[in-house]
Image (cartoon, helix red, strand yellow):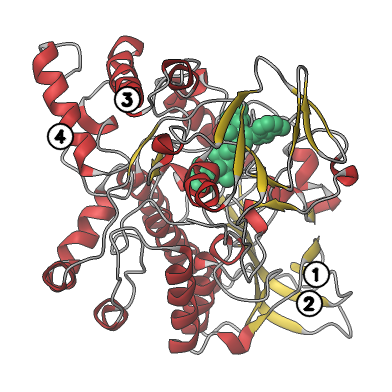
């Protein structure tokens, strides 16, 4: 397109995917431009600055593996890293590898249009700039488009409102304030204890109780840091071959074949680990057999009852509507204990739904709660939200949003039929949110980089997933999911948290090790399931 800046590749997003993709494309010799809506690097970690925001994968596991020097030079301070520390890490990586000069901040991509004639994409931003490129990588993250509470009247509220997913940079002081918090997923569970410690009154509006366990967070000792740094090589290999991207001893028994005593002992030990997957991974069938799952669910509920003094509140906080693990479990620091405070109330909005936000607060079907501030911890339009918001048009002008009307369809979760030279890092149909994102991000970026290298070596102008390969993959992803309890839950994995979103399980559940094998096989066999476009005299 004449007049538009032209580069080999545009990467959308400067989170951990975008940063690493820029690094790898540069190695390949591609001129690359990264366009980022935020004012700094870090992606989801740039925006999610709510009090208590913390990763619930351990710090040394939630870090890049591509640079041995980086691994050795960077020292994590806590078992679970806080948002500010992760943000500093992202900034350090960007500076260390001189990435910032190719990133344009405060710029949102609005559209991307493929030209069948030129085999190139034209990307348009909200600043009205167009950029012309051969390859287009969406590194837009799985949890980057927030969603609200879907109740009328927010604009009538006279106090401030906040969303956990885009918290003010300077923080918020709730000292002496009466606050309402809507939403009890990870963000609510992490932030409520801290906000409630400041506020004079806290009212928590809960639609679905979540399973949470104590994180057992603590500073890392010097010895631990030394040991972690010494073991990175073997640890990384184990991560890549694991199920969730977090090495863990694999169970060998069914939860139903052991005695009650043995099971209780095992769950207690897993609980004490303060690890997101420890209870889930105690037995082979927790996520596939409802009776087996019930034993884990009931164990966590017993912990809630032990902690929460008021039996009615404990029961309200006890999930009953879905099997343990089929909605994202949480790690917390003092969440259930918070409900023992006199100035913290829990409102069950399944029983008494929120009717509206009023001038003074939140009105449910049976009461009005006057507050000074409202916090929406209502989550995200996950997995597809960021892609659906860009007007992406592929071959013959086909729109991605329309093609995905009935649910996302992608080959290996990384490429979409009809959208040549376009890649989605940790896209729907890949392990993505069912894994340690760092492991999945690096694997996807490495694979995309190799795919682009191969395409260029073939002298091809474009590479595209075939419809047949995509259909097979989508079917396979669905079959794997249907062999588990996941589709039985209303979760954001299923799109159920967003009104009108198709109900489809969006992640690949066979594990990052198995998935990597699939991707490597496709590459080794000459990118089976892909077609290439070779130059013609007119190209
Ligand atoms: P989540 O986990 O999606 O949690 C959002 C919470 O907000 C959850 O309790 C929702 O209830 C609730 N919610 C959502 N919409 C509404 C409306 N309209 N009314 C009332 N309550 C609502 O998002 P988070 O930000 O906490 O965490 C996202 C991920 O980040 C997390 O899973 C980790 O991977 C890290 P619901 O359960 O939908 O009934």
Determine whether the residue tagged by mark 2 lies in a helix, strand or loop. Answer: strand
Measured from the top left, where is residue 409 in percent x and y?
Answer: 63, 38
Q: Nearer the viewer, mark 3 or mark 1?
A: 3
Q: Tell me: 39 left or right of 438.
A: right
The relative height of residue 294 versus residue 338 in the rendered view (above or below) is above
Displayed quadrant of residue 229:
bottom left
Q: Which residue is mark 3?
A: 300
Q: Which residue is mark 2?
A: 131
Q: Nearer the viewer, mark 4 or mark 1?
A: 4
Measured from the top left, where is residue 488 in percent x and y?
Answer: 50, 17
63 or 416, which lies in front? 63
Q: Tell me: 250 left or right of 477.
A: left
Rounded to the nearest angstrom, the CA distance separating label 2 from label 4 is 54 Å
Q: Which residue is mark 1?
A: 122
Rounded to the nearest angstrom, the CA distance separating label 3 from label 2 is 52 Å
Specify the label residue 379 is tagged with. none
Q: Which residue is mark 4?
A: 269
Is disc 3 surrounded by few (<14), some (14 to 19) or many (20+) residues within 10 Å?
A: many
Measured from the top left, where is residue 274 in percent x and y?
Answer: 26, 44
Displayed quadrant of residue 120:
bottom right
Q: Nearer the viewer, mark 3 or mark 2?
A: 3
Q: Tell me: 359 left or right of 446.
A: right
Q: In the rendered structure, which disc, 4 or 1, sits on the residue that comes first in sequence?
A: 1
Q: Is residue 433 visible?
A: yes
Q: Is residue 469 visible?
A: no
């Amino acid at each position: 397109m004449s007049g538009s800046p032209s580069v080999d590749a545009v990467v959308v997003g400067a989170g951990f995917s975008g940063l690493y993709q820029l690094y790898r494309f540069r190695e390949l010799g591609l001129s690359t431009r990264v366009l980022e809506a935020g004012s700094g690097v870090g992606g989801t970690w740039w925006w999610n600055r709510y009090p208590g925001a913390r990763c619930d994968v351990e710090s040394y596991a939630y870090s890049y593996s591509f640079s041995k020097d980086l691994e050795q030079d960077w020292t994590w301070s806590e078992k679970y890293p806080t948002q500010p520390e992760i943000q500093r890490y992202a900034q350090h990586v960007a500076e260390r590898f001189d990435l910032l000069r190719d990133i344009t901040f405060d710029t949102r991509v609005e559209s991307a249009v493929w030209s069948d004639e030129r085999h190139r994409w034209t990307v348009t931003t909200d600043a009205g700039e167009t950029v012309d490129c051969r390859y287009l990588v969406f590194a837009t993250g799985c949890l980057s488009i927030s969603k609200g509470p879907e109740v009328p009247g927010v604009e009538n509220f006279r106090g401030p409102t906040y969303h956990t997913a885009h918290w003010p940079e300077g923080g918020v002081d709730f000292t002496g304030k009466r606050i309402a918090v809507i939403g009890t997923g990870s963000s609510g569970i992490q932030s409520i204890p801290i906000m409630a410690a400041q506020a004079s009154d806290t009212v928590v509006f809960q639609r679905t109780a979540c399973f949470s366990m104590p994180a057992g967070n603590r500073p890392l000792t010097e010895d631990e840091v030394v040991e972690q740094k010494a073991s990175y090589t073997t640890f990384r290999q184990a991560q890549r071959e694991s199920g969730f991207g977090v090495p863990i001893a694999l169970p060998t028994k069914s939860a139903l074949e052991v005695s009650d005593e043995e099971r209780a002992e095992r769950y207690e030990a897993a609980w004490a680990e303060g690890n997101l997957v420890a209870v889930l991974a105690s037995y082979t069938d927790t996520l596939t057999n409802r009776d087996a799952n019930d034993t884990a669910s009931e164990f966590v509920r017993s912990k809630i009852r032990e902690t929460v003094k008021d039996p009615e509140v404990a029961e309200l906080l006890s999930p009953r509507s879905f099997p343990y693990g089929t909605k994202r479990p949480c790690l917390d620091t003092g969440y259930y204990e918070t409900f023992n405070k006199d100035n913290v109330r829990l409102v069950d909005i399944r029983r008494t739904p929120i009717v509206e936000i009023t001038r003074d607060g939140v009105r449910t079907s049976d009461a009005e709660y006057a507050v000074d501030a409202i916090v929406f911890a209502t989550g995200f339009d996950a997995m597809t939200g960021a892609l659906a918001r860009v007007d992406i048009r592929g071959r013959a002008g086909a729109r991605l949003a329309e093609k995905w009307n009935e649910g996302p369809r992608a080959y290996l979760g990384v490429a979409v039929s009809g959208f040549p030279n376009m890649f989605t890092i940790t896209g729907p149909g890949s392990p993505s949110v069912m894994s340690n994102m760092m492991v999945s991000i690096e694997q996807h970026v490495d694979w995309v980089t190799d795919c682009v290298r191969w395409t260029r070596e073939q002298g091809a102008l474009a590479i595209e997933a075939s419809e047949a390969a995509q259909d097979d993959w989508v079917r396979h992803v669905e079959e794997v999911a249907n062999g588990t309890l996941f589709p039985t839950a209303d979760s954001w994995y299923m799109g159920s948290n967003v009104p009108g979103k198709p109900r489809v399980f969006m992640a690949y559940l066979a594990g990052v090790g198995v998935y990597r094998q699939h991707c490597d096989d496709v590459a080794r066999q000459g990118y089976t399931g892909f077609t290439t476009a070779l130059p013609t005299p007119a190209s």
